[in-house]
């Protein structure tokens, strides 16, 4: 964050407030593994859940219980039995599942009962409700393997859950489900979460995981559109099975109406809050559409563009443009929009009876510099220009010459400008002319 220390709070608060506002009354399904519970940092996480609830977010929490189940199986001295990363639940295992899930749920309820301890909200009661909201059927026999009491989700009682959320409860779901004939099934927490998110038309499904999605350079993948997610799955065949499952179900829930799926590393303290309340987040966001996009500007973008170019006008890097002028010329502009904020813009102007165009007002927000957005805009404008049979692009610049030179522009004489532009040339400003053949 490029701010000085004492204004950091103000900066952060101003930037998170729009998200606080947007999330009020929204439904989030959050799923975490049984390992998360064993961690000392789990208290912090529960504290953050309470915080989300206090901001008016409708919360459905889904917990796993794998290590807790395994601990109990070990006491019985029986082997842990998985096929394709799915538990084969025999009678003993089911006994362990019931025990483990029951006690895990108690522990989470106890922690949530503390509410926002040591804050002005201490003593505010949080109500947590669990119940028989998930119906399952047997997973069955697959490839000759009988999965016994392992189940597959059949139905989520979304009316019951919605009703409870409407009344201000937090709903806690476990990796266990029932059948109409009274059977008990062991199901995965992930399948409970994804089915619930779809059934409730949740706004977000959030996976708190051990690992993040990495790209080749070991950097976290920050954003994936639905299309990119499918491509990623098709081209990466060495993914951990768990990661693959999460991505597959992320794509599926997105296709079924959940707007955003987030993958957040639970081992980073505060990661959940950072992901939710900052524009750039910290985890991976999977959404139907691109999170950030380059497009032609619309009249509604005028305030955003004005805000973006103001600092550069003040520094004299860009020529001052009035709101009226910008409104008139808005069709010349191209913008990069990131979650409702204009983070970069550029304009291009053509001149009658010439095949030369001007690139102008190229600006990138200071928080988003050196990440290729200027380039994206330049490419966009070059491509549109080519489509319109423009043969040359010129730019007038006083400071950023190198940037243009590195991208194929070379210095030119003022006389190369179209006459109309030449008459407008500001000799006092004494900008240099750079030109590029397309
Ligand atoms: N805070 C916003 C949200 O919750 C944006 C998060 C962006 N995250 C990312 N990994 N790019 O929707």
Image (tube, helix red, strand yellow):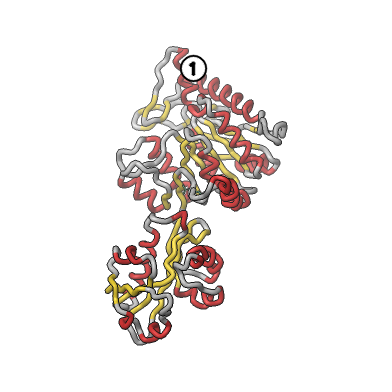
**What x and y, as percent, mark residue 260?**
50, 49
Residue pictured at 36% horizontal, 42% vertical? 214
Q: Residue at x 47, y 13 (%)?
A: 75
The percent position of residue 412, horizontal first and vertical second, equals 29, 76
Give residue 225's position: percent from left, percent from top: 42, 52
Vertical placement of residue 433 versus 308, above or below? below
Along the viewing direction, whichever of 193 and 222 lies nearer the viewer = 222
- Image: 275 above or below 137: below
Does residue 137 appear in this view? no
SS of the residue under disc 1: helix
Q: Which residue is mark 1?
A: 72
Crowd band around label 1 with a 10 angstrom C-alpha radius: few (<14), some (14–19), many (20+): some
Choose top left, top right, bottom left or bottom right for residue 196: top right
Residue 5 appears anywhere in the view: yes
User: Is 73 situated left or right of 203 in this image?
Assistant: left
* Quadrant holding the C terminus: bottom left
Task: Give the residue drawn at x 56%, y 76%.
Answer: 324
333 in relation to 267, above or below: below
Q: Nearer the viewer, residue 360 or 379?
A: 360
Task: Identify the residue at the far front of this view.
Answer: 428
């Amino acid at each position: 964050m490029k701010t000085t220390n004492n204004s950091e709070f103000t900066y952060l608060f101003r930037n998170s407030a729009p998200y606080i506002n947007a999330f009020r009354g929204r439904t989030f399904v959050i799923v975490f593994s049984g390992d998360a519970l064993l961690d000392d940092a789990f208290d912090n996480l529960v504290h953050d859940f309470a915080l989300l609830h206090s901001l008016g977010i409708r919360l459905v929490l889904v917990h796993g219980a794998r290590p807790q189940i395994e601990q109990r199986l070990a006491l019985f001295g029986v082997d842990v039995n998985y096929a394709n990363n799915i538990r084969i639940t025999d009678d003993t295992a089911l006994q362990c599942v019931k025990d483990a899930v029951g006690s895990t749920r108690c522990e989470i309820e106890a922690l949530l009962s503390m509410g926002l301890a040591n804050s002005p909200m201490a003593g505010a009661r949080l109500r947590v409700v669990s119940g028989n909201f998930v119906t399952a059927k047997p997973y069955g026999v697959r490839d000759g393997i009988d999965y016994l009491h392992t189940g597959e989700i059949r139905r989520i009682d979304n009316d019951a859950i919605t009703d409870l959320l409407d009344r201000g409860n937090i709903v806690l779901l476990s990796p266990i489900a029932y059948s109409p004939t009274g059977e008990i099934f062991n199901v995965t927490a992930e399948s409970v979460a994804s089915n619930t998110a779809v059934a409730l038309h949740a706004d977000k499904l959030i996976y708190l995981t051990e690992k993040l999605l990495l790209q080749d350079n070991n950097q976290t993948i920050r954003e994936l559109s639905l299309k990119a997610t499918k491509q990623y799955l098709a081209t990466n065949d060495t993914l951990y099975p768990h990661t693959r499952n999460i991505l597959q179900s992320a794509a599926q829930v997105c296709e079924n109406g959940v707007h955003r799926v987030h993958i957040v590393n639970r081992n980073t303290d505060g990661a959940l809050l950072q992901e939710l309340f900052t524009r750039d987040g910290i985890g991976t966001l999977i959404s139907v559409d691109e999170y950030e996009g380059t497009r032609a500007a619309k009249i509604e973008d005028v305030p955003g563009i004005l805000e973006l170019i103001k600092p550069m006008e003040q520094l004299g890097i860009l020529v001052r443009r009035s709101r009226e002028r910008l409104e008139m010329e808005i069709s010349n502009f191209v913008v990069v929009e990131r979650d409702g904020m204009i983070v970069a813009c550029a304009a291009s102007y053509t001149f009658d009876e010439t095949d030369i165009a001007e690139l102008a007002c190229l600006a990138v927000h200071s928080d988003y510099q050196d990440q290729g957005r200027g380039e994206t805009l330049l490419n966009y404008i070059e491509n549109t220009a080519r489509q319109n049979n423009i043969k040359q692009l010129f730019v007038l610049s006083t400071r950023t010459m190198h940037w243009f030179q590195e991208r194929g522009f070379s210095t030119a004489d003022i006389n190369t400008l179209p006459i109309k532009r030449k008459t407008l040339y500001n000799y006092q400003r004494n900008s240099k002319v750079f030109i590029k053949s397309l």
